[in-house]
Image (cartoon, helix red, strand yellow):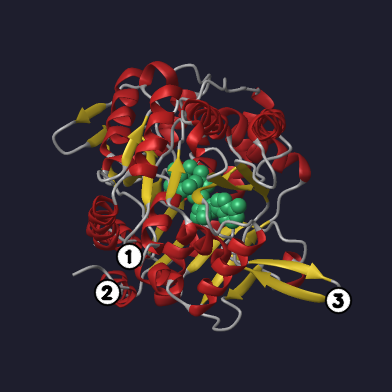
Amino acid sequence: MSWTREDLHRLIKTKLADRLFIVVSNREPYIHISSGDEIQCVVPVSGLTVALDPVMRACGGVWVAHGSGTADRRVVDDKNRVMVPPDEPSYSLRRIWLTREEEDGYYLGFSNEALWPLCHLAYAPPIFYEADWNTYKKVNQLFADAVLDEIGDRQAFVFIQDYHLALLSRLIKAQNPQVTTAQFWHIPWANPEVFRICPWGEELVDGLLGNDLLGFHIGYHCDNFLNTVNLLMEARIDYERSAVIHDGKTTLVRPFPISVDFDQISQDAASENIKREMERIRHTWKLDDKIVGVSVDRVDYTKGIPNRLLALDKFLAKYPEYQRRVVLLQLAEPSRTHIRKYKELNLEIDDLVEEINWKYQSGDWKPIIYIREHCSPPGILAFYRLAHFCIVSSLHDGMNLVTKEFISSRVDEDGVLILSRFTGAARELTEALFINPYATDDFAETIRKAIEMPKRQRQARMRKLRHTVEQNNIYKWAGNVISELTNLGL
Ligand code: ADQ
């Protein structure tokens, strides 16, 4: 039996009882934007919202996040709160306001130019500026003040998300030691040799050790974290219990592999709506007699997009019989475009797409269709369903949810997943075809294997992959974190 939304709902009712449950993340679950005279409420595409929105609806807690929408200020009360979701108000969203300078230093600067490259082995050097670090600390304090204000004198569980808020639990506990906190780190944790280049590494790790529970996607990242603590701090590591004891306080370190809403995606992917969308895409891009590969990413240097294009180039050169027959649809959502490294990556991808298409194109066929835009969720499902193969070639990735979305969408039990060994998902999805995205020749060979795999083998693999994702869905993830958290605090 797999976990359902109702199971999660029941768990919350029994475990949380009357305690206040607070989620804190940089990104908000609902964004209000101005559209002419109207205000629209938009749900950003994110696994996090899918996972935690039902939790919040069930327990009616508070979600604290940075208010980034153009109309966010217009809808809040004098405590910067708005009830969400708009169609069924059930919990409170408390917004934090940041100045342009604070966003630059905390979000673009320390979070995304220092911590993001530090934690991902993708050969992009982190950039450490003291001013960014100071802003990061200041903004973490702003979040802590808002959380403490929400808690007042109640008993509370606080569930903190990701690398933007590494200092938060420590700052909360400094004012209110009774609060129970857990944090989930959505990206990898580097090994200690890599991590030690962070000039404020000890302070950062100390901040995380304010938590009662610290979660990563996989055991390997937990081990890296424990080894980093061992290297940097005067703390006792209990490898048996996977815990750190520091200043008399224990932090449990646990793997919680994140996932998607398998049932919902399967149901959506089987709808008439998606079938119509598939027809539209087939027609627009003239795909009827083509072998279609699909990739879906935020444009990020950790996702290995150039490596994938080079492998496709190699494949077409080595197997010219597939020219005019294979098409790679690359959906690419622009991301962090104010950061130089991302601007350079966009240029590099544009050049590669242009070069490879120029080299092979013939008649109205070209091998790469590059769609640089944010795509609606039904749109993405239609692309997944059209694919003979889906390529995920991350150089390093905490989990990678595209893999699990692709699998969940394949109600026809067909399609091959080509998956980088360097994703968290590779640990679970053992029926994928694995690649090392740096090994271009092998990668090209794997594309051939995916295309030539007999249907029965494709289906057998896809059935197993679907079973894995169905059993380990997003509700199980949230349920496991909440069970572990409440076991600590009750
Ligand atoms: P991300 O690095 O953002 O997440 P991922 O897990 O793959 O990576 O999620 C990307 C999401 O964006 C998917 O839901 C996908 O559908 C969506 N997306 C991608 N391209 C899109 C497009 N063109 N239009 C619309 N949507 C698009 C971080 C970590 C991951 C970890 C997650 C969750 O880096 O390792 O899996 O958090 O913990």
Q: Nearer the viewer, residue 34 or 66?
A: 34
Residue 37 is marked as 3
Helix, strand or loop status at disc 1? helix
Q: Classify 391 as above or below 157.
A: above
Which residue matches tag 1? 475
- Labelled pair 1, 2 in contact (Cβ < 8 Å): yes
Quadrant in the picture for the N terminus: bottom left
| Horizontal side of residue 37 vs 438, given as left or right | right
List x then y, in percent, for residue 318.
47, 26
Q: How many marks?
A: 3
Q: Quadrant of residue 105?
A: top right
Q: Classify 92 as above or below 141.
A: below
Q: Earlier in the sequence, mark 2 or mark 3?
A: 2
Tell me how far mark 1 sits from mark 2, CA to CA.
8 Å
Farthest-out residue, left = 240
User: Residue shown at 57%/69% (left/top)?
Assistant: 279
- Labelled pair 2, 3 in contact (Cβ < 8 Å): no
Q: Nearer the viewer, residue 26 or 310?
A: 310
Tell me how far mark 1 sits from mark 3, CA to CA.
38 Å
Q: Amino acid at mark 2?
A: Asp
| Horizontal side of residue 143 vs 321, given as left or right | right
List x then y, in percent, for residue 198.
51, 21
| Horizontal side of residue 61 vs 236, given as left or right | right
User: Residue shown at 67%/72% (left/top)?
Assistant: 41
List x then y, in percent, for residue 489.
27, 58
